[in-house]
Structure formats: C-alpha cells, structure tokens
Image (tube, rainbow, N blue to C red):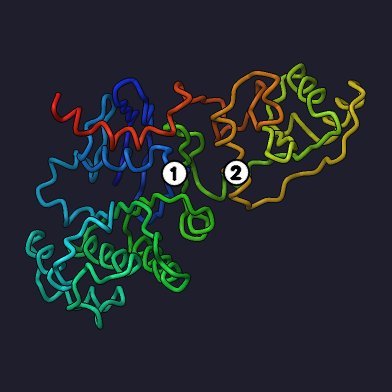
Amino acid sequence: MITATALSKSYNTTPVVSNVSLHCEPGTVTGFLGANGAGKSTTLKMILGLVRPDQGTATVDGRPFVELPNPGQIVGTLLDASAMHAGRSGRSTLMIASQMCGVSQGRVDYLLDLVGLADAADKRVGQYSLGMRQRLGIAQALVGEPAALILDEPANGLDPEGIAWMRTLLRDFADDGGTVLLSSHLLAEVHATADHLVVISGGTVVAAGRLDELLASSTIIVASLDPLAFAEALMTAGIHYVTGPDGAFTVDTAGGHVTTEVLAQLAHDHQVLLTELRHSKSNELEDLFFSVTTASNSTTSGADVAAGTDHGATGGPRVDPTRVASNPHADLGVEAARETSSKDAAA
C-alpha cells in the first residue's frame, strides 16, 4: 500500500536521506523510528510529493502521490499539527477538509466526537493546546475515510491518556485492514503500537522487519576491565560488536557461531578479565535501537571504543549496522533542508 524504493535526497552537499526503502502492507502499523534529525520527516515528505527525491521512487496504492485522483480518500496525512489556520475553529477546519475530499459534512461531527473535541469544536484552533491540535490533525487525516495513514510524530503533545487513545485508534484502524506508517522518536510508543519497524539513522535504514523478529535477534552483553584489549581481541577474531555508553560490548551471536563460551575462551586466550558475560534481555526495543544507531554512526578507529562504536565482520540477517553515514553531519540534514529549501526553490 505504501512503498518507498531507494529514496535519496541531499541539500547542497549534505546528504539528508540515502537509499531508504520501506514497504507497508494493509493491516499493519509500521513504526518509522529514528532520532530527531535522522531523516524521517524528509522521507515522509518525499512519499507525499512535497519534496522531490534526487533518486528513488515512492507510491501509495500503486501510484505516486501526485497522481492520486483524490488523495484524501486514499491516504490521510498528519505532518505538522501546528500548521493549521489558528483563526478557524476545529469544526470549520474539518468542514473545509470534507469539502476538499468530496465527502459528506455529516462526518465532521462523528470525527470531532471520535477524537474527543466535540466540546471544543467551535473554539479557534489558536486556542487549542498542542495535544488538541494533534487530535484535530488526526481527525483531518481521517476525513476522507482513507485506507492508509501517514503520521509524523502524532504523539507529540499528547498526555498519557491521549497516547493510549491514539494507540487504540491506530490499532483498530489497522485491524480493519488499514495501513499505517507512523514516524516517532518515542521508543515505548512504537513498541506498544507497531508490528513492523524501520529504523533510520543518519539518513540510512539500519534495521527493518517485523518487530518481534527484530527483537528476537540474539545478542550477548560482555564487559571487561580492559575494554581496549578486548576490543582488539574481538576485531582480531572478526566478531561484530557495538560499544555502549557504559563501555560494555553488545555482541551479535551471528546465527549461533558466537556464544558465551566462545567469548570466554577469547578473553582467556588474550588474558583479558571479564566482569560481565550474559545474554541480553529479550523484547527490549531500546537495546535494539541504540545498538543499530550507535553502529551506524561509528568509525573503525580503535580509539573510538569508549565512545560507543561498531566494529567487526559479522552481523545478524535482519539488521545492517555496518552502513555508515557518508557525511558526519548527516543528522543535521532535516535542519539543513529547512534552511536551504528557499534557496533551492529560487534556483
């Protein structure tokens, strides 16, 4: 339903998005996860025809967004809830959206009730809190009764009750056959809502797949009193690892070829004392996220061991932590996009 293939975008000489691909099927919620500035918003804008990619293609329901005859009836979008006209009421905002989508205005009252804004429907949007604007934005995305939703950070500004409400709404939408692409930097919310995951770091996809399968990727946590010596031992053995902020190593089991026994023997052979050696806890999205995003921004310098880097030759089949951003400032790409968009338009 929603497909992006090898999307790339640079502003001036700064890569913002590099070779990003994703595929979202009906009946699923895909979490598009990344730190602020990782390239999520730029990717969504390319899918929606708001930014022209340098390379790659994107389709919704099999066609580029700009070729959809009535986009609002096919895909509902929420990219920036603060962009709504502050002088209009919530009701007027949805009435105009319903006219543009060609649907009955009777749907407006239903949506206002659905998103919990019935009592505030006639207030001006400028008087709404951020959470209320997010609710209105979701209602606007649903006006055309679309089969797909593309939402950029929809949980921003919502209180815990609002987040729980949104989670239920999106799950019900997907369970009824809808397709949801949800970008966020909130790990807990993605874990609770999504069943598929795409992780982006430095403009590049570093992990993708079913959430349960990604979390099942087995890793081992190991720590040493001499991390530099043990890092050298791991590199010599060709064992892939990531160094966390606490100095501990996360080692991929590489399909069973690397075990706690192998690591213990390696430490013994190199006369390195280990202080921790255990399998990582399962079902922890935070571990996966920091593992692949730390790896994607790493270098191969031995001096980087204490800083949190990725080295070695092997890795799991569903994550790709060896993709390194081609520009060390790639995470600034979204901000660069905002600053240079007017220049590009003039050119």
Residue 18, picture quadrant: top left
- Describe residue 183's horizontal placement relative to residue 11 as left or right: right
Q: Establish if 117 lies above or below 62.
A: below
Q: Secondary structure at mark 1?
A: loop
Position of the C terminus, as image quadrant, is top left
Q: Establish if 38 lies above or below 234.
A: below
Instruction: Look at 37% across and 32% down and name the residue there.
Output: 333
Instruction: Look at 36% across and 48% down and name the residue there.
Output: 25
The CA distance from mark 1 to mark 2 is 17 Å
Outermost residue toward the bottom?
Answer: 119
Amino acid type for the residue under numbered disc 1: Asn
Pair 1/2: label in front: 1
Q: Position of residue 197 (x, y in %)?
A: 47, 46
Between 209 and 191, the one lying in front of the other is 191
Residue underneath mark 2: 288
Residue underneath mark 1: 36
Q: Establish if 303 lies above or below 83.
A: above
